[in-house]
Image (cartoon, rainbow, N blue to C red):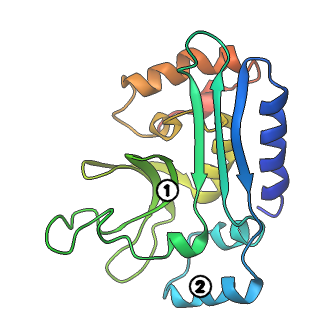
Amino acid sequence: MSNARDRLDALVTGLRENPHVELLNHELTDPLPSDRLSGLVGESGARLPAGVEEFYRRVGSFKLEWRSTEGDGANRGVVDILPLDRVLGDWSGITWFPDGEREFRPVVPFDFFTPEACAAFERGEDGTFAETVSYHYFGEELASTGRTFTEYVDLLIASRGYWYWPKTLCPGYEDSAEVSDFRRNMSRLFPDHDDTLFRPR
């Protein structure tokens, strides 16, 4: 993941040069100072999933938004990878509620690609993080993508952050509207798209 920043820059450049899409917004911030990052990792009380610390030593946060230039522009992509201090912060009142719903307390969001859903880590009561990334629809659904964080970043770049793309990796969503849109539109917008990468394991 040492080249994560260069690859995200290349993603933005590719979108900017693609005649099928309009780049609406992008922001790639600098990483936190090394001592602050090390402190956050230490304070987390558990080993982060493989690749996470290395990624955040190159990237502070990453936002991206684009839309298709064809039709009504409904086809779009959104990425919002949060800063690590936010990821490791307090999610009460967002993913779970102290006086109510606690089912999703283990959910630790890191890619807020839409206000109602995200890609997230799951953290057990003992503080241990699962090695695979999950898709979470707030208050309702939680499903494993079956991919590590490093694989998630690879596929995020390959998907160009197409809206709701993480659902393509989760069993049970094969017939959902979002997955159907992804399969119908990606190869048209991006001729080098490899749809075989986006399947449940």
Q: Nearer the viewer, residue 61 or 24?
A: 24
Q: Residue at x 53, y 20 (%)?
A: 74
Q: Nearer the viewer, residue 149 or 161?
A: 161
Q: Earlier in the sequence, mark 2 or mark 1?
A: 2
The percent coordinates of residue 57 (x first, y second) are: 75, 73
Secondary structure of residue under mark 2: helix
Residue on which the image places disc 1:
133
Relative to 79, is 195 above or below?
above
Residue 25 tag number: none
Q: Nearer the viewer, residue 170 or 37?
A: 37
Q: Residue at x 66, y 66 (%)?
A: 51
Relative to 55, is 72 above or below?
above
Q: Residue at x 80, y 23 (%)?
A: 18
Residue 1 in the figure: left or right of residue 124:
right
Residue 40 tag number: 2
Q: Residue at x 73, y 90 (%)?
A: 35
Secondary structure of residue under mark 1: strand
The percent coordinates of residue 3 (x first, y second) are: 83, 58
Disc 1 residue type (three-letter): Val
> Which of the two marks, 2 or 1, is nearer to us in this view?
2
Which quadrant is the N terminus positioned in? Answer: bottom right
Relative to 24, is 57 above or below?
below
The percent coordinates of residue 97 (x first, y second) are: 22, 69
Write down the quadrant of residue 31 in the picture: bottom right
